[in-house]
Each structure stands twice: as structure tokens, then as C-alpha cells.
Amino acid sequence: MIVANLGKVRSFKISPRFLAWSFLFFVFYIVVSIFIINDYFEKRWTNDFLTEQLENLQFAIEDTKNQLYKSKKHLVLLESHLYSKKTEIEEEEVKTPAGSEIQEKNTTLQAEDNPSKKVMEDSQRTPSDIVDIEDLEIKKGKNTFTVFFNLVNVNEKNKSVKGYVHIIAVNKKSDPPQLWTYPKVALQNGIPIDYKRGQLFLIKHFKTIRGEYFLDSGADIPSSIRILVYDQSGKMILEKEFEVENVS
């Protein structure tokens, strides 16, 4: 019922069913709104959390990159230090008096327990006025084959010689010939592909070189030994081949 300004009274009826449906609609609307708002805030919180985690991960990645860079720099410094120490040791070997070297040579030869077998130099060789090979001997163990020799500086200018040595054992009795290398290197036409993978040497007078090979059980021993010597530039300054005799 509505009362107007002029004293007129007007009345109307609202259906109870309409009120009930309106009430149910507003209740449903409020409930749905609560769920929607709650879902919004939950997704926003999740998004903020993931964003923060992503930022932390990015900071961690940057920190890891910095640590890796520092580690690489430290590794380079260590390698440089080790190379310097190795060079100093080789230079000390060069400065050793000749008499001491001869005594060391004799001591080394006497320290070998098992009898060693001499080898005979073959006619195939590359002459060299820089280095030469002396006192080459071999020893055969149960499954090993060891080569010893002295790399001698024959340079008339009496300058130190630095380079790389490769020792190649060959079994010519097999078909095709079987090859063993010391140190382990890949060969192409019987020549090392990378000469710098050979055994490094620096000599003033001479240096004892040792090469060891591991053979399969029952395998034939090498029938000859090839020794290749390179200078620092990669030029072959000596090539000699030795035939193995009377090795059981």
C-alpha cells in the first residue's frame, strides 16, 4: 500500500512466488559471486607465487653462470700453472750435469729385474743431425711388451731439443700388419694424425724414453719397432725402425 501526497491510497499485491524466486535468485547470485571472487583471488595468489619463483630461478641461473665463469677462469689459471711447473721440471732436467745423467742412466738399467733382449737396427731409417737413438732394449712380460731407449741430442750447436716421440710396434707376420702405438694415437698410412699427442721431451744431452704395450693373451709379439721423432713445428726429425730378435 502506497500513500500519495494528496491523501490517495493505492495498493498492489506482490506474488509470494515472485518473492520466493527473487530471493532464490539473489542467494544463488551471491553464492556464485563468492565462488568466482574466491577463484580469482586464488589464481592471482598462484600467479604471484609463480612469478616470484620464476624471478628467484632467474637470479639462481645468473648466479650459476657467474660461478661457472669464475670456475673456468680458475681452471685456466691452474692449467697455466701446471704447464709452467712442467716446463720448469724439464728445464731442471736439461741443467743436470752430464756425469749425473750417466749415473742415472746406469742406475735405471740396473734396476730392471728381468733380462732384456737387444734389438738390431734395420736398414730403413731417416738420418738426423739433431737427435739419435741409443741403447734400445725391450722386455716381454706375461701380457706386456715394454720398450726402453735413450733419445740423444746430437745437435752440434749443443742446443736443447724439444719435441714429441711416437713409438709404433708392428707385427708384420699378421695380415694386415698389426699396429700398437705409444702413446695411444690414431694413424693414417702408418703416421700419427696428430703429432702433438706424442710423448713430450726436452733434452740437453739425452733422455730415457719408455713405452709399454698391453697384448692380448696368446697374441704374437711385435716383430719390429718404429720410432718417430717430431720437433715442435711438426717436422719429422728422425725415423728409425728396429727388428726384434730372439724374444720369447
Image (cartoon, helix red, strand yellow):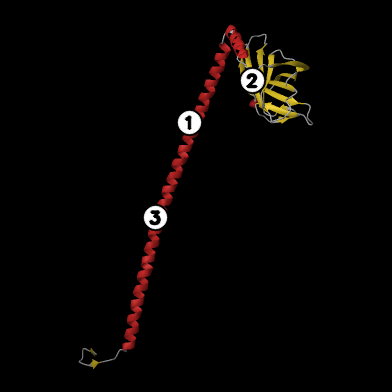
Q: Earlier in the sequence, mark 3 or mark 2?
A: 3
Residue 244 in the image: state x and y as whole percent. 74, 19
Using the rendered view, name the quadrant where residue 149 is placed.
top right
Viewer-closest of 206 and 63: 206
32, above or below 45, in the image: below
Q: Residue at x 52, y 21 (%)?
A: 85
Which residue bears the numbered disc 3? 49
The 10 Å Cα crowd at callout 3, few under 14, some 14 to 19, many 20 or more, is few
Q: Residue at x 71, y 24 (%)?
A: 168
Query: Amino acid type of disc 2?
Result: Arg
Q: Secondary structure under badge 3?
A: helix
247, above or below 76, in the image: above
Residue 142 in the image: state x and y as whole percent. 66, 26
Viewer-closest of 101 and 90: 101
Q: Earlier in the sequence, mark 2 or mark 1?
A: 1
Which residue bears the numbered disc 1? 74
Residue 83 in the image: state x and y as whole percent. 54, 23
Q: CA separation, marks 3 and 2?
A: 65 Å
Which residue bears the numbered disc 2? 210
Q: Secondary structure under badge 1?
A: helix
Quadrant (top left, top right, bottom left, bottom right) of the C terminus: top right
